[in-house]
């Protein structure tokens, strides 16, 4: 038998010079942010958090109310405060200088007039001056309907003397219906020690009539009161 021919595969054509194994691809270098950017970011976050905290506290403070005293009616300077003259209200007055203790205010005298609903400043009250409490009877028609807290003037008249100023200005402390005067009223006032005898002497005059009028506007001038000598002598 003849020999079979062997087929030897021919080598693959070379595409270029042999250079050994292929080199690995270079690893790209990542650019790192500067450290000062990290500090600015942290600082910005801290400022935002601080603003949130401060804003929340301011909002909470603005919404918080505090109890303070307010007056229930118009009151003249010199009025000695009573419990009924005051009420407690809730207001948003942070760091206020208004009184909040009713017990500490009762018995104090106002140093200036206050209006109904007005908050009571600490600077508007002081220790009540030394006075003597007197009740002055006013017959029906001799005065308008009076109430505590008003400023009034008192005038005296008798059959023997014309109308004379008894007290130029005095705050009304209390008013009550008068007994036996046919609809009159008894007015309680606080009289200075140097004026007590003047008022008591006037009330003791026979057929004396005391009239009262409500004062408005600014306080009256502290002028000397006219003497009651003629009224006292001729009325007895």
Image (cartoon, rainbow, N blue to C red):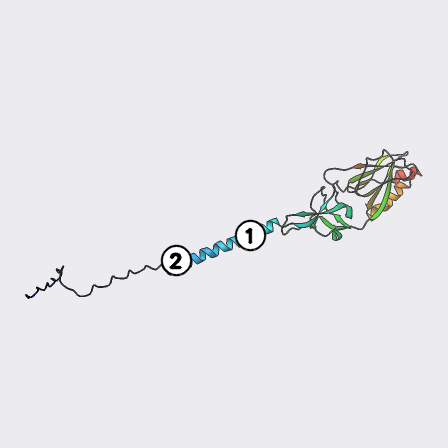
Name the foreground residue: 145 vs 155: 145
Residue 210 percent coordinates (x, y):
86, 37
In the drawing, does residue 211 fall left or right of residue 97?
right
Look at the image and tell me whether residue 80 can be seen: no
Secondary structure under tag 1 reads helix
Secondary structure under tag 2 reads helix
Name the foreground residue: 141 vs 38: 38
Marks 1 and 2, the one that precedes in the sequence? 2
Q: Quadrant of the N terminus?
A: bottom left
Residue located beneath label 1 in the image: 56
Q: Residue at x 48, y 55 (%)?
A: 47
Residue 37 bears which disc, if any?
2
Q: Residue at x 89, y 41 (%)?
A: 203
Q: Residues within 10 Å of mark 1 (few under 14, many from 20)?
A: few
Residue 197 percent coordinates (x, y):
87, 46
Residue 180 percent coordinates (x, y):
92, 38
Residue 184 bears which disc, if any?
none
Q: CA distance from mark 1 to mark 2?
A: 29 Å
Q: Residue at x 76, y 45 (%)?
A: 85
Name the foreground residue: 174 vs 211: 174
Say which quarter of the image contains residue 166.
Answer: top right
Say which quarter of the image contains residue 141.
Answer: top right
Residue 10 lies, with reference to residue 185, above or below; the image says below
């Amino acid at each position: 038998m003849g020999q079979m021919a062997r087929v030897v595969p021919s080598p693959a054509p070379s595409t270029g010079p042999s250079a050994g194994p292929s080199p690995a691809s270079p690893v790209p270098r990542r650019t790192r942010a500067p450290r000062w950017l990290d500090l600015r970011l942290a600082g910005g976050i801290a400022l935002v958090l601080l603003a949130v905290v401060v804003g929340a506290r301011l909002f909470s403070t603005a919404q918080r109310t505090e109890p303070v005293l307010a007056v229930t009616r118009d009151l003249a300077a010199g009025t000695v405060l009573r419990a009924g003259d005051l009420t407690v209200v809730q207001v948003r007055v942070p760091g206020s200088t208004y009184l909040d203790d009713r017990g500490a205010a009762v018995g104090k005298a106002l140093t200036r007039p206050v209006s109904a609903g007005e908050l009571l400043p600490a600077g508007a009250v002081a220790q009540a001056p030394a006075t003597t409490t007197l009740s002055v009877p006013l017959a029906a028609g001799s005065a308008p309907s009076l109430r505590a807290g008003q400023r009034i003037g008192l005038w005296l008249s008798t059959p023997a003397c014309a109308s004379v100023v008894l007290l130029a200005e005095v705050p009304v402390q209390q008013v009550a219906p008068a007994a036996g005067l046919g609809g009159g009223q008894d007015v309680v006032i606080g009289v200075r020690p140097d004026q007590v005898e003047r008022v008591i002497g006037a009330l003791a005059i026979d057929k004396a009539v005391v009239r009262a009028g409500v004062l408005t506007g600014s306080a009256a001038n502290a002028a000397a009161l006219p003497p009651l000598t003629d009224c006292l002598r001729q009325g007895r």
